[in-house]
Each structure stands twice: as structure tokens, then as C-alpha cells.
Amino acid sequence: MATLFGKIVRREIPADIVYEDDQVLAFRDINPQAPQHILIIPKREDIPTLDDAKDSDGPLLGHRLLTAQKLARELGIAESGYRLIMNCREEGGQTVYHLHLHLLGGRQMLGF
Ligand code: AMP
């Protein structure tokens, strides 16, 4: 099902895009929770949640993690540290049902 992230992939709505390749798109969160708050999403629109991912999606999921690593370096937060979050469904706090990884950094992260 198309979500607003799918519309961002198709450039139907604007976003502050910081990285793109053939598999993933990364853009700034519209409601940042840290000085650096990036969302990294697959361009594919058929993985609403992590629970919907298949074994065959492993390379894509790994690529997304390594994209986070590279972006953290580019944004200058790799050495100070950062947090990656993936919310899954309602009790996980997921609000947009297009798989996404939050990259947060630029401030001290506190405990849960
Ligand atoms: P989650 O709660 O894990 O589903 O995260 C969804 C995230 O998407 C939230 O942090 C929102 O602030 C962010 N968000 C919602 N709409 C937009 C948008 N149009 N552009 C960028 N980020 C958005």
C-alpha cells in the first residue's frame, strides 16, 4: 500500500533528501528528535514493517545498515556516536507503514 514515504520516493511530495542509490533513499525527518535525524528507507514499497521482511530481503536490510554507517560518517557523528531505531507496528511506535530506519545523532542519547 502506498504511503507518504512512497510519495517521497516518487518525488510526489518534497523531502530534504541526503542520499539516494538504486535501493535506498535517505532524507531528514520532518520532526527531528536530534540535531541529525535521518530516515533511511528502501525504495521498494512492499515492506511495510520489519515483520514483513523475508530472508531474501537480507541484502537490502544489510545495505540499509551500511548506508546508515556511511551517512553517520558524512554527517560527522560516527566518532561521537549515534543511535539507530526501527519501530515495528503499533506498540513499537510505528506510524508510517513503509519500512524505515531512524539515524539519530548530534546529542547525547539517553536510556529508554
Ligand atoms: P515511525 O514513528 O517510526 O513510523 O517514524 C515515522 C517518522 O516519519 C516520524 O519520525 C515522522 O516525524 C516522520 N515523518 C512523517 N512525515 C514525514 C515527511 N513528510 N517527511 C519526513 N519525515 C516525515
Image (cartoon, rainbow, N blue to C red):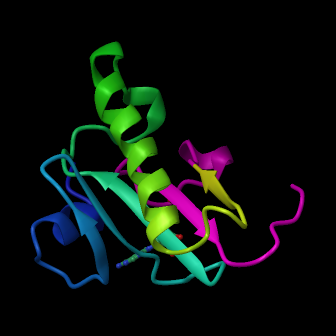
Q: Residue at x 53, y 59 (%)?
A: 102
Give yes or no for residue 40 being in the magenta stretch: no
Residue 99 image offset from top left, x and y in percent = 39, 47
In the rendered view, does 111 fall on the left or right side of 56?
right
Q: How many marks?
A: 0
Give yes or no for residue 91 being in the magenta stretch: yes
Considering every residue shown, the one lying at the far front of the view is 79
Range of residues picked out in magenta = 86-112
Residue 30 image offset from top left, x and y in percent = 45, 83
In the rendered view, would you say 91 is above or below 12?
above
Considering every residue shown, the one lying at the far top of the view is 55
Residue 36 image offset from top left, x and y in percent = 56, 78
Considering every residue shown, the one lying at the far right of the view is 111
Quarter assignment of residue 93: bottom right
In the rendered view, does 43 fall on the left or right side of 77?
left
Nearer to the camera, 78 or 98: 78
In the rendered view, would you say 66 is above or below 80?
above
In the rendered view, does 55 fall on the left or right side of 31?
left
Residue 103 image offset from top left, x and y in percent = 55, 62
In the rendered view, would you say 44 is above or below 70?
above
Q: Residue at x 90, y 57 (%)?
A: 111
Q: Residue at x 87, y 55 (%)?
A: 112
Nearer to the camera, 17 or 1: 17
Q: Residue at x 56, y 74 (%)?
A: 76
In the rendered view, does 57 fall on the left or right side of 22?
right
In the rendered view, would you say 44 is above or below 108?
above
- Tell me which secondary structure the magenta stretch mostly adopts: loop
